[in-house]
């Protein structure tokens, strides 16, 4: 009888030990925040998810994604970031400068990886729990396309949105390159989409061609901008492949899907404890391919001997 009681006493303990040994680890919680739904930003997000899966992080099994879109509203960015902190996410993936800034303002403990940011220093995103990838395009090479397309180019326009530090930084690099080439630069900015038509019409009358950096306002109004320039027999070069289908004529564009994959590899190293954000450099794409709008080049009787 004593042995029987002893077995009954030990049985619950054995069951507890057994269940404890079989207990599944909680999935890694990753908060993904994005400023707006946008072709390039969506590609970066998908590249991030796909590459993490390749590295062994499968949604619904060992990782749990929380996707949030801010709808272009900065106050929403802050609310999303605070929610991620309150939910104790293991990592935050911030797509765009405003999202990264909101995340950085909300936590110094949760690791943050970011992308679709051109210049981290100018955007005040240098802190110990944050790293990421840059979407800086090869602006020098893009500007050099203009006189190759139109041999008698004298003056190049630059149009950007002043609502974000990234396009302003890109515009500055473009202006510097234009002057280094011995050409004249005419640079103007907009703060809202409804200002684009008037500014584009002014530039189209004064310059031989236009450069447009990566910028959500000019991206959405590219058909309007390119249409205005085409009427004057002029053209637009850009810093994003997706703008070619909207009327731009040439670019060495950023592959945002690859950018997302690069950021995922950074995230994996952090999650595995192989590296810490403060010891990881901001990474840049190295390979860019030229994309040309052959139909428009032919229509405007431009040169196409570009390699």
Image (cartoon, grey):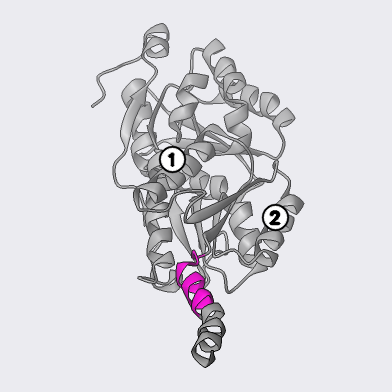
Residue 221 x/y as whole percent: 62, 26
In the image, 99: left or right of 277? right
Q: Which residue is painted at 31% across and 33% down in the image? A: 289
> Is residue 176 shown to the viewer in this render?
no
Residue 248 x/y as whole percent: 47, 23
Vertical order, 149 against 180 (above or below) = above
Question: In terms of image quadrants, where is residue 189?
Answer: top right
Vertical order, 193 against 262 (above or below) = above
> Is residue 89 shown to the viewer in this render?
yes
Q: Which residue is painted at 45% across and 36% down in the image? A: 239
Tell me the tag on residue 80.
2
Return the residue found at the far bottom: 2
Residue 66 x/y as whole percent: 61, 51
In the structure shown, which secondary structural element does the residue marked by tag 1 occupy? helix
Considering the image in quadrants, where does the C terminus appear? top left
Tell me the tag on residue 256.
1
Report the magenta residues as a range: 14-25
11 or 224: which is nearer to us? 11
182 or 200: which is nearer to us? 200
Tell me the tag on residue 161.
none
Residue 61 x/y as whole percent: 48, 52
Give whichever of discs 2 and 1 has the lower sequence position.
Answer: 2
Q: Which residue is painted at 43% across and 21% down in the image? A: 249
Q: Which residue is painted at 66% across and 66% down in the image? A: 85
48 or 302: which is nearer to us? 48
Which secondary structure dominates the residues rendered in magenta?
helix
Residue 244 colored in magenta in the image? no
In the structure shown, which secondary structural element does the residue marked by tag 2 occupy? helix
């Amino acid at each position: 009888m004593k042995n029987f009681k002893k077995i009954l006493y030990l049985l619950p303990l054995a069951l507890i030990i057994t269940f404890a040994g079989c207990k599944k680890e909680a999935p890694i919680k990753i908060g993904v925040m994005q400023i707006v739904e946008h072709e390039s930003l969506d590609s970066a997000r998908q590249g991030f998810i796909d590459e993490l899966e390749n590295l062994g992080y499968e949604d619904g099994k060992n990782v749990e994604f929380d996707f949030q879109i801010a709808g272009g509203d900065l106050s929403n960015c802050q609310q999303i970031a605070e929610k991620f902190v309150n939910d104790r996410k293991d990592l935050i993936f911030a797509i765009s400068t405003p999202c990264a800034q909101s995340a950085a303002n909300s936590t110094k403990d949760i690791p943050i990886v970011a992308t679709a940011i051109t210049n981290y220093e100018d955007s005040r995103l240098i802190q110990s729990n944050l790293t990421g990838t840059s979407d800086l395009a090869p602006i020098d090479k893009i500007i050099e396309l203009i006189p190759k397309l139109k041999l008698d180019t004298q003056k190049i326009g630059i149009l950007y949105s002043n609502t974000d530090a990234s396009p302003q930084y890109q515009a500055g690099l473009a202006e510097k390159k234009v002057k280094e080439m011995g050409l004249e630069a005419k640079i103007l900015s907009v703060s809202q989409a409804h200002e684009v038509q008037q500014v584009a019409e002014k530039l189209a009358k004064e310059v031989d061609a236009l450069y447009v950096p990566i910028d959500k306002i000019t991206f959405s109004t590219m058909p309007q901008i390119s249409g205005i320039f085409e009427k004057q027999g002029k053209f637009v070069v850009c810093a994003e492949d997706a703008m070619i289908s909207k009327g731009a004529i040439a670019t060495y564009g950023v592959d945002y899907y690859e950018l997302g994959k690069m950021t995922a590899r950074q995230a994996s190293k952090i999650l595995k404890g192989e590296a810490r954000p403060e010891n990881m450099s901001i990474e840049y794409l190295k390979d860019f391919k030229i994309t040309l709008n052959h139909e428009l080049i032919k229509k405007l009787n431009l040169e196409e001997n570009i390699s």
